Amino acid sequence: MLRIAVPNKGSLADSSIEILKEAGYRQRTDSRDLVLIDPANGVEFYYLRPRDIAIYVGSGELEAGITGRDLLIDSGANAVEILSLDFGTSTFRFAGPVGSGLGISSINGKRIATAYPGLVQSFLTTAKLSADVVRLDGAVESSVRLGVADVIADVVSTGNTLRQAGLEVFGDPILTSEAVLIKGAKTELVNELEILMRRLQGVVTARQYVLLDYDIPKDRVDQACAITPGLESPTISPLQKQDWVAVRAMVLRKDTNRLMDELWALGARGILVTDIHACRL
């Protein structure tokens, strides 16, 4: 059986369970359950701390797991990302005292407080910088005021917490993280794991895209297809109404209303949007 690690708590837990359900896998209904067997799909799910998942997968004890890209890098585990899952997005950045005018090169020789020492050290090594990394498990924003560090490196969303602590971000983001499917670096892509990847990719795509159907005069179909080229090519069907055709194409969900406006202005009518629940592309 394929053994998969799933976050047992935290920001990734509920969304991980939801995407696995949409992909056709059983999931636990009691948060106290540590293991769930899905015999129909030949999978065992293990519910673990998000920070530990990359370690278990990298050691080969489990074949794959869902965790954050930041946690994967921070762990230093012998595991690799094989699919991004398009949820749990976060940005990892440096921050220092407001008005200090710090830049990335300014962190050379500084003390950096973070809950992600492995990730920060990896960045420093790549950037050929040297700094003292101070590991903290929480309340990183208070470290500068309390004299433990000169700057911090942490996940930043709105920046409100930083501002309250008298800090501001500087430099480009260290990393943009999201939930990812990982496998052990030495783990082979067995059939069950390939099926898991295809199913999850199908859910990710279905969430990102919708089907757009509309009717358009034949003499404007080329212009319409330029607006909605689809993933490969739109489907075009004749209508009983002479000199009109029906067009169907997959479009990005976030672009739907803009595309509908453009098609309407071009002369398209009967514009319909349909959700996609699953797909294989």
Image (cartoon, rainbow, N blue to C red):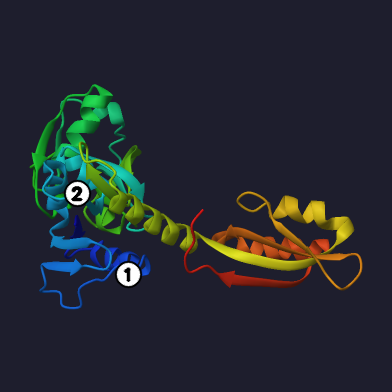
- The image quarter containing residue 148 is top left
Q: Residue 78 at x, y = what percent?
A: 17, 37
Q: In the rendered image of this protein, does residue 233 appear above or below residue 241? A: above
Q: In the rendered image of this protein, does residue 72 appear above or below residue 256? A: above
Q: Mark 1 highlights which residue?
A: 21
Residue drawn at 30 percent across, 58 percent down: 160
Q: Name the outermost residue toward the bottom.
A: 29
- Location of the N terminus by quadrant is bottom left
Residue 111 located left or right of residue 98? left
Q: Residues within 10 Å of mark 2 (few under 14, many from 20)?
A: many
- Residue 258, labelled with which disc? none
Label 1 sits on a secondary structure element that is: helix
Q: Residue 210 at x, y = what percent?
A: 57, 64
Q: Earlier in the sequence, mark 2 or mark 1?
A: 1
Q: Nearer the viewer, residue 175 or 105?
A: 175
Distance of label 2 from label 1 (alpha carbons): 19 Å
The amino acid at mark 2 is Glu
- The image quarter containing residue 28 is bottom left
Residue 71 located left or right of residue 253? left
Q: Mark 2 highlights which residue?
A: 63
Q: Nearer the viewer, residue 66 or 134?
A: 66
Residue drawn at 12 percent across, 40 percent down: 149
The amino acid at mark 1 is Lys
Q: Nearer the viewer, residue 233 or 156?
A: 233
